[in-house]
Image (tube, rainbow, N blue to C red):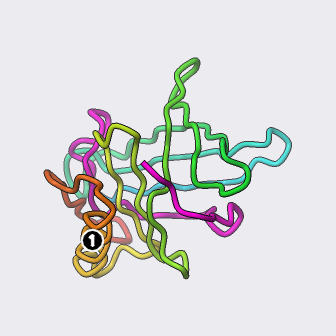
């Protein structure tokens, strides 16, 4: 699976609301799902925090810290992410809006997919647009789950 041609890593940092996708077992039932990327210059890595409400908009808040490393230093679209040591998984930025307002993250076998945006409001047009673009690239977009959002938290 090809990644985007170029990612400005500093511009990619910040908050991304997870709008839809095919998720890992740890993410199932997530509401208000948010990925936060922070560049950790001394360690030359990305510190990632995934937070969400478990099972409902007002469910218990869960947090999964992770670490990421940019594998492809030229284009920036291929990362390796570790939810816990020593595991590291491929994390591919397979599509990205020119203005960094939305992105799609995949994995080589297409088992997982995350469609994220900088804003959680009005997700349907974003998800529809990204799905159309991914289909044109040959990335599987079936069985997507939409993540409910309500901010601030209820």
Judging from the image, what secondary structure is the residue with disc 1 in?
helix
Nearer to us in this view, 66 or 5: 5
Q: Residue furthest right?
A: 42
User: Total number of numbered labels?
Assistant: 1
Residue 41: x and y in percent read 82, 48
Measuring from the top left, give residue 56's x and y in whole percent.
Answer: 20, 53
Looking at the image, the residue that sits furthest to the left is 143
Can you tell which quarter of the image residue 54 is in? top left
- Compared with 82, 95 (above or below) is below
Foreground pick, 112 / 133: 133
Query: Up-down: is 71 above or below 21?
Result: above
The residue sitting at 53% across, 64% down in the picture is 15
**Where does residue 59 sit, x and y in percent of width and height?**
25, 49
In the displayed structure, does residue 26 sit left or right of residue 36? left
The answer to whether residue 21 is magenta is yes
Give the residue at x 54% y 75%: 100
Quarter of the image with the C terminus is bottom left
Q: From the image, tell me which residue sits under label 1.
A: 127
Give the side of residue 103 with respect to residue 56, left or right: right
Q: Would you say 74 lies left or right of 92 here?
A: right
In front: 58, or 112?
Answer: 112
Q: Quadrant of residue 76?
A: bottom right
Q: Position of residue 92 (x, y in %)?
A: 49, 49
Query: Mark 1: few, some, or many residues within 10 Å (few <14, many ≥20)?
Result: many
* Residue 15 lies in the magenta stretch: yes
Q: Residue at x 31, y 64 (%)?
A: 134
Q: Residue at x 71, y 64 (%)?
A: 10
Range of magenta residues: 1-30
Q: In this view, which residue lies farthest toward the top?
A: 86
């Amino acid at each position: 699976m090809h990644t985007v041609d170029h990612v400005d890593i500093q511009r990619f940092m910040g908050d991304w609301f997870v709008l839809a996708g095919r998720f890992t077992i740890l993410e199932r039932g997530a509401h208000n799902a948010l990925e936060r990327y922070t560049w950790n210059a001394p360690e030359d890595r990305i510190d990632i925090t995934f937070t969400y409400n478990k099972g409902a908009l007002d469910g218990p808040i869960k947090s999964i810290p992770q670490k990421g490393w940019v594998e492809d230093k030229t284009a920036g679209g291929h990362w390796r992410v570790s939810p816990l040591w020593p595991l590291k998984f491929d994390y591919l930025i397979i599509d990205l809006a020119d203005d960094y307002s939305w992105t799609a993250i995949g994995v080589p076998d297409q088992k997982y997919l995350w469609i994220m945006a900088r804003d959680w409001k009005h997700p349907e047009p974003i998800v529809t647009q990204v799905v159309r673009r991914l289909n044109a690239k040959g990335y599987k977009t079936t069985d997507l789950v939409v993540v409910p959002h309500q901010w601030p938290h209820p």
